[in-house]
Amino acid sequence: MQQSALTFSHDQAEAHDRIAEMLRAAGVDLDEGVVLPAREGASKVMAVTGKAGSGKTLLLAALTRAMEEAGVDIVSGDWEGRKRRDRRTLAILAPTNKAASVLRMRGVPATTIHRILYTPVYDPEYEKIAEWLAGNGERPEIEGLTDEALDRALAFYQSNKSVPGALAAAGLRGSDFITGWKRREEPLDIGLVDEASMLDDRQFEDLQEIFPNLLLFGDPAQLAPVNQSGSMVFDKLPDNARLELHRIHRQDADNPILDLAHALADPALGFEDFERMVQQAAQRDERVQWAQRVEVDLMARSPVLVWRNATRIRLINAFRAVHGAPEDALLEGEPLICDGIELPLKHRKKRLDLEARGLIKGAQVIYLGPGNKPGFSRLHVIGAEDPRVSAASIVKIEKPDEEEPFIPFAARMGATFLHGAAVTIHKAQGSQWRDVQVFAPDLYAAARMGRSEAGQPLWKRLAYVAITRAEERLHWVVRNRLAKPTGPLRVDDLRAAPVPLELEVQEEAGV
């Protein structure tokens, strides 16, 4: 077992050994650090499940390091070098940009599932730079690029392992070196999927087609995907393919947020009893706040988490009102949530372009201002490795008690957006924020209704998911009140890409 495994708990060590056995049978021996060519045979799927803090990410990271040290190549989704017959590959995946960025912040080179399903097509001239950066070719001579620009690209790649980021550091735009996107035709090898509780059956089938060796990491206490009848994809695996972690590792710092989350497992615990626990935790530890109002300043970067759509719409309109936002325009710095792509089937390439830039359903976005064409928006995609895009946009502002949303401006087709100052707890899955505000009156309403999901009261599942979105501080909001902002909306706190990626869908494409 690798040296990093010395800190494992008993159940983590057991899971590590079971996974190592699976990989050894596939030709990757972590104990000996030996990698053999891939073998033909049936695909293998295994799941590691556990509640928040049980050490799933620690195990995932340790397996990633061990495979990389053994000689398995990590596929990032932005570039793949020349294929070798004996090459073994690994991809670390998450369902959303935000979930992937949480892993990257912990040193795990994760990408989104979509960026693995669809691969970039590079301009042949700039493909030479990518091959050189990946160690598969000589230093190229490219017309228009100086030695200093290539040195910047190399320095960026050595510290970040991102080919698009390196090319941007050399002064190139994404439209210069990426000419399009295509569905992956050839399978990969080993896939590690975080936040697997968010996968639906279709995504799971896609992943099984690509990865003969697939490891899922998920939390069974979260909310199942919509239309999955309360079940998750790993629930259907045989017992010997599921490994459960129990020990709570993040409790080393006596985390009161996790204490509250795990208290929800008590079947005798009622909503009122739980709220008393929250209030008592707030008196002992500043990481839990018993909040009398929603802090509007936090809503610009971390949405208020709610259960009911009516609550979400009221909070969004209150947020816009206190910032003095006009009805016919967005302010720079307003948060948005991508609600999908509205394009006909004949514009499939344009859909791939939009999704590959991070504009997938559920993506969190900050509005930076109008684009160069009517209906276009400049956007910052939260969690994306190259966050700046300009895209045809359809922005929908929902109004209380009105069936149809108000659309301040729109392209005829493109990426659609809802406002992101408040989101449902379902849509918050896979994301984490430093501060999280949970609108408790909504959970009380769920408790009063007495609804259940997968044999557990719905309010407990909602509370568990909402609470575990908080990285550092939980705000349990108990009153329907909104604070005043301390200042205007801002965009200067966002990480700027070296050069904004322009995704100007052409008028001749019908957009």
Image (tube, rainbow, N blue to C red):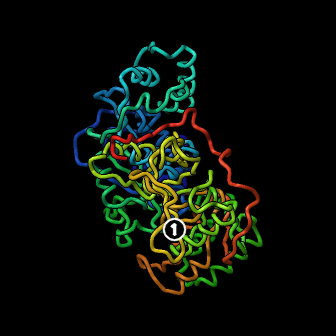
Give the percent coordinates (x, y) of residue 435: 66, 60
Residue sitting at 50 percent across and 86 percent down? 449
Residue toward you, 26 or 461: 461
Query: Would you say 276 lies left or right of 55 here?
Result: right
Tell me, yes or no, if residue 183 can be seen here.
yes
Give the percent coordinates (x, y) of residue 508: 34, 40
Residue toward you, 199 or 264: 199
Residue toward you, 390 or 8: 390
How packed mark 1 is, by other alpha carbons closer than 10 Å (few <14, some 14-19, many 20 or more), is many
User: In the rendered picture of this protein, how many numbered marks are placed on residues?
Assistant: 1
Q: Dot 1 corresponds to which residue? A: 398
- Furthest residue toward left: 41
- Classify 438 as above or below 68: below
Residue sitting at 56 percent across and 42 percent down? 107
Tell me, yes or no, if residue 63 can be seen here.
no
Give the percent coordinates (x, y) of residue 83: 31, 28
Callout 1 amino acid: Glu
Query: Would you say 235 lies left or right of 443 here?
Result: left
For the residue labelled by badge 1, is the local secondary structure a helix, a strand or a loop?
A: loop
Residue sitting at 42 percent across and 36 percent down? 78
Give the percent coordinates (x, y) of residue 330: 58, 55
